[in-house]
Amino acid sequence: MVHTLPEEQRHLLELVEGFARTEVAPRADEHERAGAFPRALFDQMGTMDLTGLPFDEEVGGSALPLRTYLLVLEEISQAFLALGLGLSVHTLATWGIDTFATPEQRRDLVPDLVEGRRLGAYSLSEPGSGSDAAAMTTKARRDGDVYRLDGVKAWVTHGGVADRYLVMARTADEGAKGVSAFVVDADQPGLTFAAPEEKMGLKASPTTQLLFEDAPVPGDRLLGGEEGRGFAVAMASLDGGRLGISACAVGLSQAALNVALSYARERHQFGRPIAEFQGVSFLLADMATRTEAARTLYRSVAERRDHAQGRGPHQDTPGAGSGYSTTRAAAMSKLFATDAAMQTTTDAVQVLGGYGYTADFPVERYMREAKVLQIVEGTNQIQRMVIGRDLTGHGSR
């Protein structure tokens, strides 16, 4: 499908493939073993203009279609998921700020995110409220020209290493309507960071809590200049974020398939490559089919979003008539792609047998990494709720 891109975008993909192969992939194991965030690689993506692909030129972006950005994200994630996920979360936070900012905020806060000079992060969940965002307890109390933030935000991807956070906090006791969005820099007085979580995988992508204690956030950092818009900011941002996770999952699936296929061709048993045995070849066939189906789904959803925004040709989606919902489709894509990644990485370990269970090959890491993709940006059970409610018209997301 890449051959259908304009020449300039094809050249971009070739550049990214070379960067992923020569600069990113060789450093993945090193960063994972050390639990070190690959900031130098992120900065390099900024110099390559990869941090601003889908954003308008007036804020320093490239104004490219969402589909093209997702192709880049898939390629980066295939080489090193922690870096791909970092780019996805950065874009999620930047999009939320860019879309809902006042003109002044857009001028002052967005360009250095788009150009990669600052790393953005997204902060919605709390220790007691994950997907139930309306139940959050972090408060923002107006005090003259500032809002004083108190509370704990949890599960913040690259928390503690990011420079700018999109933070949801409660300004009124009115459920979802009482949530507001703030743009908070890492050096904000009253903001500290807990120790990174000890995770199963993605050790190079720190996940931390943000601790706010009477933090005087300037009033001009209230996103959009209005209280009560935070829930809308959070949910709208997640639609694009779920497509980003879909692309990350497909990249991880492809990486696992590549290792399993190479091993099956080279490993001999009973005088022939194990790829020739039906049990192994069927596993590989299922892995390839799931990966391609997930890839086709996320690209199709992205193309429809691009068409709606005037950034790409319209592509018909089977079954997508007047009732087509990008929210539902993004949830479907995230659900399918991440479930596929979990199964594909598990099958890759099986193809390699005992070797797959050792750190000598990367598939055991891929399997550990795939699990979290079924959890972030809303668990896959939440995705099913979103899809079901959208289909039936009952309830809200």
Image (cartoon, grey):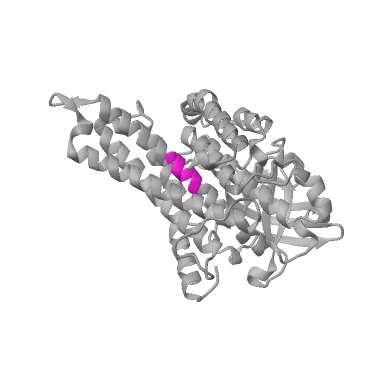
| Location of residue 110 (image quadrant) | top right
Residue 297: % across, % down = 45, 53
Left or right of 306 in this view: 182: right
Asked which quadrant contains residue 358, the reply is top left
Q: Position of residue 194 (x, y in %)?
A: 60, 43
Residue situated furthest right in the rendering: 144
Identify the main secondary structure in magenta.
helix
Give x and y (percent) for residue 117: 72, 35
88 within the magenta span: no
Task: Give residue 261's position: percent from left, percent from top.
Answer: 31, 32
Judge by depth and name the residue closer to the eye, 253 or 320.
320
Seen in the picture, residue 363 relative to 330 is either above or below; the reply is: above
Q: Residue at x 63, y 36 (%)?
A: 50
Asked if residue 202 lies left or right of residue 118, the reply is left
Against 12, residue 322 (above or below) is below
Of all residues, the one furthest to the left in this rendering is 270
Q: Residue at x 52, y 70 (%)?
A: 323
Q: Which residues are magenta?
A: 246-252
Q: Which residue shows up at 49% across the image and 49% down it?
A: 246
Q: Is residue 273 left or right of residue 356?
A: left
Looking at the picture, tell me which residue is in the foreground, 151 or 345. Answer: 345
Q: Nearer the viewer, residue 339 or 257?
A: 257
Above or below: residue 313 compared with residue 232? above
Magenta region includes residue 247: yes
Q: Is any part of residue 206 visible from this angle?
A: no
- Residue 89 visible to the viewer: yes
Where, quadrant-wise, is the C terminus in this rendering?
bottom right
